[in-house]
Amino acid sequence: MNVIEKASEGLSRTYEIVIPADDLQARLSAKIEEIRPEVRLKGFRPGKVPTSHIRKMFGESIMGDLLNELVPETTQKTLDEKKLRPASQPDISVTSEAKDVLGGKADFVFEIALEIMPDFEPADPAKLSVTRPVAVVEDAEVNEALERLANESREFAAKKGGKNAKAEDGDVVVVDFVGKLDGEVFEGGSAEDARVAIGDGAFIPGFEEQLLGAKVGEERELNVTFPETYQAEQLAGKAAVFEVTVKGLESPQDAKVDDELAKRLGLENLDSLKEALSKRFEGEHAQQSRMKVKRDLLDKLDAEHKFDLPPKMVEAEFENIWREVASAIEQDQLEDEDKSKSEDELKSEYRDIAERRVRLGLVLAEIGRRNNIDVTQEELSRAINQEAVKYPGQERQVVEFYQKNPNAVAQMRAPIYEEKVVDYILELADVSETKVSKDALYADEDEASAKPAKKAAAKKKAPAKKAAAKTDEAAAEKKPAAKKKAPAKKAAAKKDDAAAEKKPAAKKKAPAKKAPAKKAAAKKDA
């Protein structure tokens, strides 16, 4: 085998691999001898088919199989001998004539084109200084949560005033309704004993508001228009009339913060509830502190490193990001500040973000490689099982999906690996804690969640967007950030899923029961 370097520019390399015809013929002969005892052909005793006959009958087919084995084998050998670390899968192109090679008349020649990993010295973690903001849980925060829980769990009772009582904001109106489009009843537009909490916002615009002032026994026609973005496409944007009969009025009772509240929530007493809330907030603050110190660390690492990036890796990352941006443009979900920018301006900004992700990914990967950091099978299995429990009843299918999809496993492994490397760096770095208020700890949270980043070139600092911390997650595996890296506002919902599950405010304030499927049409989002 002869290896000739054809091109070397920046991180790009091209090699020509030549395997002489004589070598190929020797390999072919050896392969024929290997399989000869197993060959069965009519007219010959088992294992006694002449080598020349096997070569004549199957020579080209066997040679094709040999070449398929030789390409990856010689490619890897070349990489090992040249001590090259490819940044992506090498491109292989055969330059010799297949017919001549298979016929034993020509050398087998192919080219390997690849981009290699940049050679750089990563920053010494012990020389990095970062700040971890911390906030203590204040009594006011716990009390506010208690008040919110009390309001959310308060009971409703028949409104005083009898038949003269009128529905007010915050009341629950119990109704039967029938929805019609152009005078015709439509499927899913009717319900009985539906509980409509006025002001709750659970029904389509105008539905709740038109029940203000309603009395028990009263019949009303509610004229509404389904939102253009309504999930049921056949109803989206259409005007409808709902014939409503009011069957009951209920008003909220006083919300009390006491032991009974705690018991309704499954705890022993009010002190237990306070303690549980305090611990929950401590956990949330710790997560936020971790996010902030990680962001600071990534900013410092980004500022410390300047080296050439593999173009294909950057391009793949950019395409991932731009796919989400393009979707945001199409759905008119771009941030206001971006709506006035041209496509070229947006592409320039998001390309900077792609470069940052790739650069930080390579830095973290190199630090991890040099310090023998890896993800254990136990850690990976635990993460897969945690993902599986999110799909009750389908756990086995989820696990099997990961067992059969190496790429999915790699995507699961990436953030685990990154967090381990970040932990390693933080253990060695100079980490100073600074006490801040809760507001300061969560500052820019809403703004940050909207986009993965803004242009960071000038400040060498993580874009002041919440997703900036996440922009760099999973990058450590030198992969496009598959998960959850949407630059549009939609990404915020995914990013904050975990927090939303923990915050009482995320629940509807009224206990109005959700209508079953057949009642869904009147709801805001069917």
Image (cartoon, rainbow, N blue to C red):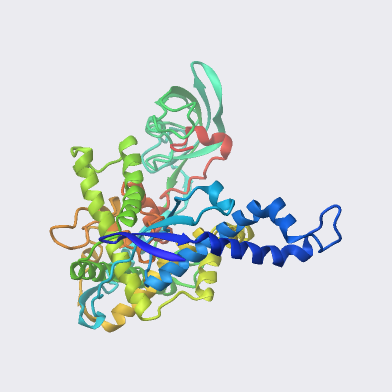
Q: Residue at point 22% right, 44% down?
A: 346
Along the line of sight, the residue nearer the viewer: 386 or 110: 110
Residue 466 visible (yes or no): no
Q: Position of residue 233 (x, y in %)?
A: 47, 29
Q: Is residue 215 above or below residue 87?
A: above
Q: Residue at point 29% right, 67% down?
A: 118
Picture quadrant where residue 458 is located:
bottom left
| Total marks placed | 0
Q: Position of residue 486 (x, y in %)?
A: 35, 50
Along the line of sight, the residue nearer the viewer: 458 or 157: 458
Please give left or right for residue 310 compared with residue 54 in the image: left
Q: Position of residue 6 (x, y in %)?
A: 33, 58
Please give left or right for residue 315 compared with residue 240 in the image: left
Q: Is residue 435 above or below residue 460?
A: below
Give the residue furthest to the top.
183
Picture quadrant where residue 270 is located:
bottom left
Q: Position of residue 212 (x, y in %)?
A: 38, 33
Give the residue furthest to the left.
458
Along the line of sight, the residue nearer the viewer: 153 or 75: 75
Q: Residue at point 46% right, 72% down?
A: 269
Residue 287 visible (yes or no): yes
Along the line of sight, the residue nearer the viewer: 74 or 510: 74
Q: Residue at point 77% right, 60% down?
A: 50
